[in-house]
Amino acid sequence: MRILLNHIVLFLSFYSGFAQIFDVEAIQISGDNNKRINLVILSEGYQSTELTDFIADVTNFTNDMFSQSPFSEYANYFNVYAVKVVSNESGTDHPGTATDVVEPISPITNVDTYFNTTFDYFNIHRLLYSTDHATISTVLANNFPEYDQALILVNSDVYGGSGGTFPFSSTGASASEIAIHELGHSLFDLKDEYYPGDALAGEAINMTQETNTSLVKWKNWIGINGIGIYAYGNSGTSATWNRPHQTCKMRYLGFPFCSVCKEGMIEKIHDLVSPINSFSPVSTTIENPSFPIDFELTLLHPTNQDLERTWTLNGSIFSNDVDNISLSSTDLNEGVNTLSAVVIDNNSYLKIDNHETIHVNTVTWTINYSTLGVENITSEENAFKISMYPNPSSEFLNFKIESLTNSKFKIDLVSLDGKKVKSVKLNSFSKININRLTSGIYIANIYANNTLIAHKKFVKH
């Protein structure tokens, strides 16, 4: 999935008096740009003689980011590039207009930089920002349109940064921590876990007004790794909003991301990138193949845990948790055979059993086999985003399924003793009545085109 640039920005970048092209340097390459999250870092306030310093700053930031969880476990899902945007002068503006400090806390300056960044934005000294998003978008359109997230690194040793569509960070003390925190906002939709003010408060991955431990969105984490329901404040509106942890990086720099934020970040990673890097064979015609025929997945395994892999042949499990299999002639039926590989990230960082949304990626091969041998093999890759809620439930289960291709879905509800109690065809959105089921724990087996692609526990109250 790639960011689609605004048509107006594209028009401006093409027809403006100049379409400035800057040098782009690869910092980390894990794979093809269309199969990775492309983090693009733009220089601001660096003159042409300081671009070596910029690359050193980017490299230090990249090393720091990938030393921290969950970036460290999913580093192979990212590419990092640096765009060497040249400014006429060094640094950034310090207008001295902040009201939260006694000014001038920094020397008052007004410098000529490419994106016109400034401290003291909104009268907050450490708020480093630029309203010139059009110029940023134009630079990206002209130099790296395949970006997924951009970050502007500002050549200043004064502490500061901001989030938003484009995060900004200075290069002074705690620079890497600032940038990682701001990426938490911009790339992963996390909220601050210090109170951000009434205007910025809202329901999010790590912010809620829910106080019931059985209903809160991070209910699966309650009591684990310090996760609870903690009010932002003691009075006023802040007391009505809650965070999951007391010392998450989204509250204090220098601390790790809490389990709730980490889970949300991994969910976003899977929204952007499939863990299936490639597979073979790709759709092809095979003449007189020699058995066994090999089928293989090349996967992006997190470093802390392998992905779950289930291979099924004609609806029956053929193998588990391997990246390749071989089929002999005796494995195939005469006619059409269906081989599927289902890949799920069951990382311990994800509470999959009762988690509302899971991501499933599949490759399906159709093998036509006759007495003359294999006539052809076709392949299809798919990605599913499956949501099941509420859980627990007493009356209804809602299912929402997003898919890359048209598939026919059904669900079998199975009791823990293995008895199928209900089977229902599913649409992209379906509501299933479970009112008549007895209270207890059940398994929801979800099928796409008769292939089991996911199973989730749910509790019937």
Image (tube, rainbow, N blue to C red):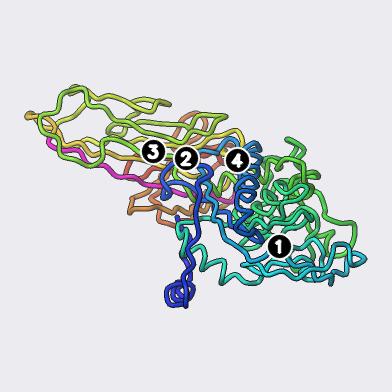
Q: Which SS class for mark 2? A: loop
Residue 52, how many percent across, how many down? Answer: 61, 48
Residue nearest the viewer, comparing 124 with 308: 124
For marks 1 and 2, the one nearer the N-term is 2
The circle drawn on residue 71 is 4
How far apart are the alpha carbons under marks 4 and 1? 26 Å
Q: Earlier in the sequence, mark 3 or mark 4?
A: 4
Q: What residue is at 63 percent from the left and 67 percent from the top?
A: 115
Q: Label 4 neighbourhood size at 10 Å, few (<14), some (14-19), many (20+)?
A: many
User: Disc 1 to disc 2, how far (Cα)?
Assistant: 35 Å
Return the residue at label 1. 202
Q: Earlier in the sequence, mark 2 or mark 3?
A: 2
Residue matched to label 3: 452
Say which label, 4 or 1, has the lower sequence index.
4
| Magenta: main secondary structure | strand
Q: Compared with residue 189, is residue 293 higher up or lower down, i.e. above or below? A: above
Tell me whether the residue at label 2 lies in contact with that at label 4, contact meaning CB atoms closer than 8 angstroms: no
Highlighted range, magenta: 375-390
- Give the percent coordinates (x, y) of residue 155: 69, 56
Q: Quadrant of residue 454?
A: top left
First in residue order: circle 1 vs circle 3? 1
- Callout 1 touching callout 3 (CB < 8 Å): no
* Foreground disc of the pair 3, 4: 4
Outermost residue toward the front in this view:
49
Residue tagged 2: 30
Image-quadrant location for residue 461: top right
Asked if the residues shown at circle 1 and circle 2 are in contact, with their CB atoms under 8 angstroms apart, the answer is: no
**In front: label 2 or label 3:** 2
